[in-house]
Image (cartoon, grey):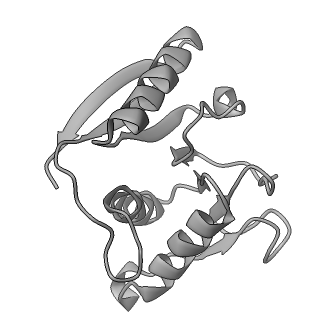
Amino acid sequence: MKKVIFYLLENPTPANEAGVLFQEKLACEKIVEAWQNKQRVLVACQDQAQAERIDEYLWQLDTNNFVPHNLAGEGLKGGSPVEICWPQKRSSGARHLLINLQQQFPEFAGVYRDIIDFVPVDDQQKSLARERYKAYKEAGFNLKTIPITC
């Protein structure tokens, strides 16, 4: 069964000193968990700047949480186990899990069985998340929400 887990962020949290948003940090935690469970992951970012923040954050993790990753178009053919893309630079390799940080519904979502998405506190972002929720539902995904207190 295809499923999407939405993490509902309940408190506004500012970006850290490196500009990493709470949902980006949470996404990185989910990337580490997936990698430790031997899953290949695609991280779909809103833009190149966000992709580069995620890339840099993953490089800063301690060695126990190291995740082989690359930005789309870099590295070996088929990419690393974790590949980070944005709309102008898509991945071509097969992955188990999609972590969506884009504001819109990813048109390629249908090829994934498991997706992680986020509902930020900001009203405009929350509205966009509701639209994605509806689109996932219409695409036949089983939906689950998990509240996260920042």
> Where is residue 21 drawn, in percent x and y?
37, 63
**Residue at x 80%, y 62% (from the top left corner):** 78
> Where is residue 53 drawn, in percent x and y?
53, 73
Report if residue 99 is visible in the image: yes
In the displayed structure, would residue 133 be above or below residue 6?
A: above
> Where is residue 7 drawn, in percent x and y?
30, 40
Which is nearer the eye, 86 or 19?
Answer: 19
Report if residue 1 is visible in the image: no
Which is nearer the eye, 149 or 114?
Answer: 149
Which is nearer the eye, 25 or 15?
Answer: 15
> Where is residue 44 drawn, in percent x and y?
61, 51
In the displayed structure, would residue 34 be above or below residue 111?
A: below
Q: Is residue 101 left or right of residue 110?
A: left
**Residue at x 86%, y 68% (from the top left corner):** 77
- Splitting the image into 4 quarters, where does residue 103 fall? top right
**Residue at x 23%, y 35% (from the top left corner):** 146
Q: Dividing the image into 4 quarters, which one contains the C terminus?
A: bottom left
**Residue at x 47%, y 30% (from the top left corner):** 128
Which residue is farthest right?
77
In the displayed structure, would residue 95 be above or below residue 111?
A: below
- Splitting the image into 4 quarters, where does residue 121 fall? top left
Q: Is residue 47 left or right of residue 133?
A: right
Which is nearer the eye, 33 or 38?
Answer: 33
Tag count: 0
Q: Is residue 128 left or right of residue 51?
A: left
